[in-house]
Image: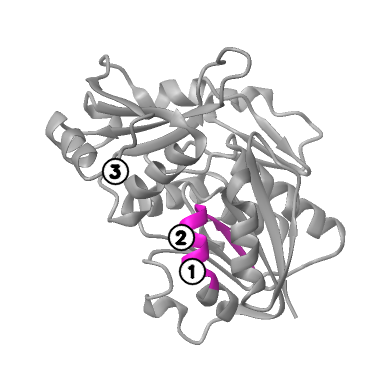
Amino acid sequence: MTLQSIVPWALTLTGPNKAIYAIGEALGFDDVMEALSISIFEAETRAAGDSPNSVVQALYETQADAESALSRLSVRSEVSHSIEQLPETDWVSLSQQGLPPVEAGRFWVYGSHDEDSIPETAKFPIRVDAGLAFGTGHHGTTKGCLLIFDALLEEGFAPKTVLDLGTGAGTLAIAAAMSLPSSTDILATDIDHDSVLVTQENARVNGVGERLDITQADGFESDVFKERSFELIFANILAGPLMGLAPDIAAALAPKGKVILSGIIDEMAEAVTEAFTAQGLSVTPQPSLEGWTSLLAVKS
């Protein structure tokens, strides 16, 4: 069953950025993800002087699923929440139509609804329709990764081996396949089976399906990582999982390898930096995008 064929129930929580970010982690990463999709975005503009708020919305197949998810959360008093069934429509298509194309250096990320608006100057146009997965490129986290990657390419960085950890909709793995013709091993993994299916379809649509090794894997526990190291790792996840995976990510990096880290709200950037610095990596924060910080970490 797909999101297009059901009328989902939305669990929506609104509150301070840090609290909502933690809830997003709990819904999507602390346990096996049960939601059809999860989105985190800024709340509507508040009165002057008020603290900024964010919203996390998770879609579920049934009301019982949404209520069960809420019951497992530790919701602070300043976080409001609601559960309601959404109007019957094609939510995947609707969500895509509201997203404009995104330019990130040499990369141009667009949805199928903007097929006719690709500029001639776009060196690597990437068509990505997220479906039930994450990472369309319209979020500040994916764009931040692409901008760092573009700068590395400009410097002549040409890794032969690449890992896109938590690939989502496959945007970063596809970008690597398009721009690194000499790469010999591009692995894209995700804990979520739907993400694997979406990435496979997006890779096919963009003509790089045969260049990607796409598989379902929970962190680095899978056998797919045995005797494998990577000159470049994309890890666009969330701060909590990134800090927990820091030793494994560092171990999987080849000497002089680089890791692009994202999914980090600005308030958590220092903690994530410290976690990777503790693993012997040199970490350089990048400018914030829409309240999210991306990091470039390099192994000595």
Q: Residue 249: image x %, image y %? A: 55, 72
Cβ atoms at labels 2 and 1 below 8 Å apart? yes
Q: Is residue 284 above or below residue 281?
A: above
In this picture, which residue range is highlighted in magenta? Answer: 232-246
Read off the residue under disc 2: 241
Is-magenta flag for residue 235?
yes
Q: Which amino acid, by three-letter code, is at mark 1?
A: Leu
Disc 2 marks a residue whose amino acid type is Pro
Across and down, in percent, residue 259 comes to 65, 65
Say if mark 3 contacts mark 1, CB within 8 Å.
no
- Residue at x 24% of width, y 27% of height: 8
Residue 107 horizontal/vertical position (percent): 72, 43
Residue on which disc 1 sits: 245
Q: Are marks 3 and 2 in contact (CB under 8 Å)?
A: no
Which badge, 3 or 2, is on the more N-terminal residue? Answer: 3
* Separation of marks 3 and 1 at Cα, in angstroms: 23 Å
